[in-house]
Image (spheres, helix red, strand yellow):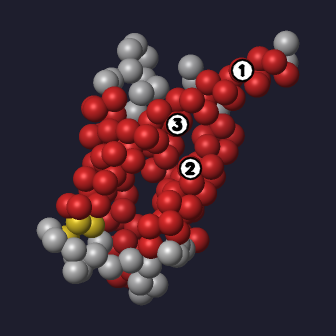
């Protein structure tokens, strides 16, 4: 089903808020830029199975989601941490890191979180569709 821009924006905000909550639980803090990054990542992960035909298997969605999140995290880190100097995160002490902005352990964590996000996003769309049908019936 084709999704509207408004629906993606609402889901982006919801995904961003959920991500900020996860980050507060994990690190004890978050940053406003994570609302935007988390929201974009949530929408991107959700779009992975919205192509026509059958959806890819969950493992493929999770792998593609982890790759997308890692690339978005790198781009965001280079902007907010390196260019703007906000120091939102620094993975320099993590193994297999790249410029302190991404690292293998968190890329693997995104694999699991992307699988969860894909299912959550599908469930939210199903709920939104049921509400839409009930309201406009």
Q: CA distance from mark 3 to mark 2?
A: 9 Å
Residue 132 visible within the image = yes
Read off the residue under disc 1: 130
Q: Quadrant of the C terminus?
A: top right
Quick one: 34 or 115, which is closer to the camera? 115
Q: Could you tell which of marks 1 and 3 lies nearer the N-terminus?
A: 3
From this view, report whether residue 103 is shown above or below residue 6.
below
| Corner quadrant of residue 75 | bottom left
Label 2: how many Cα within 10 Å (few below 14, some 14–19, many 20+): many
| 62 relative position to 125: left or right | left
For marks 1 and 3, give the CA distance: 15 Å
Identify residue for label 3.
120
Circles 2, 1 touching at the beta carbon (< 8 Å)? no
Residue at 85% over, 22% down: 135
From the viewer's side, name the closer residue of 25 and 107: 25
Q: Quadrant of the N terminus?
A: top right
Marked residue nearer the N-terminal end (3 or 2): 2
Q: Position of residue 13 (x, y in %)?
A: 63, 52
Task: Calculate the distance from the C-alpha at mark 2 to the C-alpha at mark 1.
Answer: 20 Å
Say which element carries label 2.
Answer: helix
Q: Earlier in the sequence, mark 2 or mark 1?
A: 2
**Relative to residue 80, is residue 11 drawn left or right?**
right
Residue found at x 53% / y 29%? 122
Above or below, comparing residue 49 to residue 25 in the picture: above
Mark on residue 15? Answer: 2
- Residue 106 in percent (x, y) is at 29, 61
Residue at left offset 45%, top offset 50%: 41
Q: Are marks 3 and 2 in contact (CB under 8 Å)?
A: no
């Amino acid at each position: 089903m084709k999704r509207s821009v408004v629906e993606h924006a609402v889901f982006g905000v919801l995904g961003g808020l959920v991500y900020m909550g996860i980050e507060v639980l994990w690190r004890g803090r978050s940053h406003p830029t994570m609302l935007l990054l988390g929201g974009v990542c949530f929408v991107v992960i959700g779009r992975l199975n919205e192509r026509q035909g059958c959806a890819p298997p969950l493992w493929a969605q999770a792998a593609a989601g982890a790759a997308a999140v890692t690339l978005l995290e790198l781009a965001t880190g280079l902007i907010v941490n390196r260019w703007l100097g906000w120091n939102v995160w620094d993975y320099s002490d993590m193994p297999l890191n790249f410029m302190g902005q991404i690292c293998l352990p968190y890329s693997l964590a995104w694999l699991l979180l992307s699988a969860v996000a894909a299912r959550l996003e599908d469930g939210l769309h199903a709920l939104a569709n049921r509400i839409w049908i009930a309201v406009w019936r």
